[in-house]
Amino acid sequence: MSQSSSPVIRLADYRPTPYAIDTVDLDFDLTPETTLVTAVLVLSPRPGTAAGEPLVLDGDELELVRVVLDGRELASTDYEASANRLTIKAPPAGSFRLETTTRLNPAANTKLMGLYRSSGTWCTQCEAEGFRRITYYYDRPDVLSVFTVRIAAPKAEAPILLSNGNPVSSGELADGRHFAVWQDPWPKPSYLFALVAGDLDALEDDFTTMSGRKVKLAIYVEKGNAPKAAYAMDSLKRSMKWDEEVFGREYDLDVFNVVAVSDFNMGAMENKGLNVFNDKYVLADPEIATDTDYAGIEAVIAHEYFHNWTGDRITCRDWFQLCLKEGLTVFRDQEFSSDMRSRAVKRISDVRLLRSQQFPEDGGPLAHPVRPEQYKEINNFYTATVYEKGAEVIRMLKTLIGDDAFARGMDLYFARHDGEAATIEQFVACFAEASGRDLEPFMVWYREAGTPIVTVEESWDEAARRYTLTLAQVTAATPGQQTKKPRVIPVRFGLVGPGGEDMRPTSISGSEVNGDTLILTQPSHTVVFEGLPSRPVPSLFRRFSAPVKVRQSLSSGDLIFLLANDADSFNRWQAGTTLAMTALVKATQQVRAGQAPTFETAPIDALGSLLDDPALDAAFKALLIAVPSENDVAREVGENVDPDAVAAAHHAYRRTIAARLEARFRAVLDADEAAAGEPYVPDAAGSGRRSLANTALDLLSMTGSPEAMALVRRRFETATNMTDRLAALTILVHRGDAGAEAALSAFFARFGEVPLVVDKWLSAQASAPLPETLDKVMELTRHPAFSFGNPNRVRALIGAFATANPTQFGRADGRGFGFVADVIARLDDANPQLAARLLVSFRSWRSYEPKRRVQAETALRSIQIKPQLSRDVADILERTLA
Ligand code: B3K
Ligand code: ZN
């Protein structure tokens, strides 16, 4: 369907369905080419439904075989059926039984929505609207029902038959077939349905819950891969324990199954009792996975498990409420990872992600509120705004009402809405009740898009010992929202005294104060702190207490002071980042003006002395010296961006750091090599050490000295784990080192059979900031290890090129844009979700300088002229060009 003809779905139009589905019995008869699905629904009218009101069920590319109503096969005049709708014109009064049979071809399902095949395994993905590709149904989250599922399949091909809930029976059938029946006692919406059938290995374990019930755990993987699921299993058990201890949530079925598949549109899916995962977030050992992969597995396993309560037991009334489960579950997984690792390091990583993914979304054509009010294609709303900003909003709520009220609010939410499909209003009402605070003003965070800018001005009255901060907020217009209301903004703060201690004013006036937090509610506040012994250095938004942009002109001296002294680790890092960003933006302006970039040395030396501080952990040091990315700098520059100028400034800055801190970086690497004999552990300490060493190596290589490059080559050759090996390979490739080709060949010779590692090999090449990269990427699309049919391969090659290679995607000749646009147009028929995701990489096209802006627009328009664009791509395109 083309975009212009696809309807806008609006929150304001929400109505419950006229009928409830009391029970669902699904029968799957699986053969590779054809699958017959018989669904028996027992339906009953909801109160207020008029007698004979038509029953209209959703479908998508369905082929109807027959319809039986209360035991009688319907004549074609009694119903209307199309591929995307089944209407029973006049259902009987009272409850009735509808039986439909549909015929599917899972092998031909390249959209990876509904029932499809991945490496010979039958699997499903139903969120958001994939269940309607299996059978006619009320495919929406507010229709909850209890499911019984019978699966029959050829036993040799699919000895493992899984669905939601608990296994109830199984047995043999004729012709080498067998069956299994699964029953899920918990009412759920269709998007949480799952089925898996295949010849898989399992890693098994068990977990005893807090009330003493033993739960059987299994992670199913392709043959031979079970040992690689060990870290995922360990993460699962830690997640189950943590959710009991921190949120009081106990698991509620006899079994919990996870299945890893290699063809998956996203990270993973929280189907009740049967999570289906992209194998990238399950499989790991030190040979194939990096520290980042391990942390990702831990976080995603936790995230999907936590959905059991925030998503499954309490689900969303409609898709506008998506952040009800996603923002909350991201918040929960962030807290889990913080408890497992370093809280400060986790916070900094999360904020970096928010700024790099969500801020550009909020500031561009795809901006939408955390709780949107309209959509054309819901799959395009699984965004950083709904997920990451959604989590920030919950974090602010906690800051605002305090930990205890927050915990009581969560308990109330679980108690009050268990078994329901809820709204954001209902969720927030629990916290209003638990805290006694009016949270209506806070709702602006859910209703309005855009990142507020908070401007800070200070003054110090030496004679009166009075310190004044003026904090003013504004949020720019976003598509469809011209005017913005002021938000409730919690500002966690410290007033840092000359010795690094937090000073205590005798009084604070001008805003509400809650412990160490100022609460802004007005467009502007003048906050007065009385009775301070000397001018403090303000440390604002500690721990990043609100997802805003801060405009504050602290001197380099103040920032260097905070970098060294702030009691808040996040703000120490923030001070260093602000110093680096200021230097990079200034250098970019110098390059554009045809001047050589120049840098202050004091901030660099300050970083250098922190490297010597034994009190700081390695992961934190790595974050301190990590230079903001070129994309970060471009975002800060904001308009008329010339990616080549940004790259030149970035290059010059890194060379300056490298030259100045060379000896220290060498010391870091020596220390790392001294630890080389220790066994690989992907925990905070081990990954921190590697992260610091590899960041130092990357910077050291910027000197371009033969010794530095020899060191990189040696580290590549002698690496004993994937983290170090990939870090060294990436440096060789990105610097265009003479040894790069040999290293790439050696890497492929060793790992060419492991698709998840091939992805790293593809990404390292696609992100190389070299003029030959585009041709290389085109050539790699024809490599036997690459396939347009596999989302991980496409993201590793094309996605990395479009998002992690600003100078080559943004080539001055426009060929980078043109290439990615061609790929999107080509992918759209087979896999619209994947194509739409890639298209998002164009969202900041208006920030380019005029020449590139024209070229990006030309590329976007070349997609638009393609006939039969998917709704997914057409929607993103329309909004991007609007
Ligand atoms: N809920 C799924 C995402 C589904 C995406 C549908 N397009 C995974 C998650 O957030 O846990
Ligand atoms: Zn989720």
Image (spheres, rainbow, N blue to C red):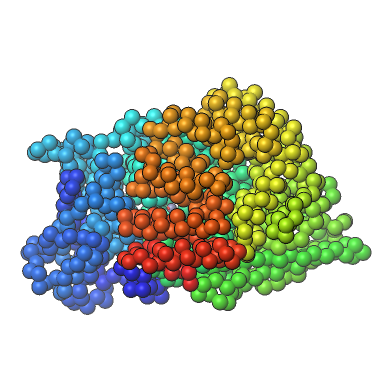
At horizontal 41% and vertical 33% (from top left) the residue drawn is 752
Q: Is residue 541 left or right of residue 502?
A: left
Q: Nearer the viewer, residue 299 or 861?
A: 861
The residue nearer to you, when weighing 244 against 579, is 579
Residue 142 vs 165, above or below: the answer is below
Q: x, y percentage for residue 30?
A: 18, 46
Q: Is residue 394 visible in this depiction of the protein? A: no
Query: Measuring 67% from the left and 73% from the top, which residue is drawn there?
Result: 523
Q: Is residue 246 left or right of residue 271?
A: right
- Where does the image place residue 740, in percent across and percent down from the top left? 54, 34
Viewer-closest of 807 and 530: 807
Q: Is 710 on the left-hand or right-hand side of 823? A: right
Quarter of the figure with residue 830: bottom left
Which quadrant of the figure has residue 466?
A: bottom right
* Outermost residue, top side: 677
Q: Is residue 60 visible?
A: yes
Of 841 and 707, the residue lying toward us: 707
Describe residue 576's horizontal placement relative to residue 159 as left or right. right
Q: Position of residue 698 (x, y in %)?
A: 63, 38
Quadrant, the N terminus = bottom left
The correct choice, above or below, for 349 with respect to 219 in the image is: below
Could you tell me which residue is drawn at 41 percent across and 36 percent down?
283
Residue 224 % position (x, y)? 33, 29
Q: How many marks?
A: 0
Q: Residue at x 19, y 45 (%)?
A: 32
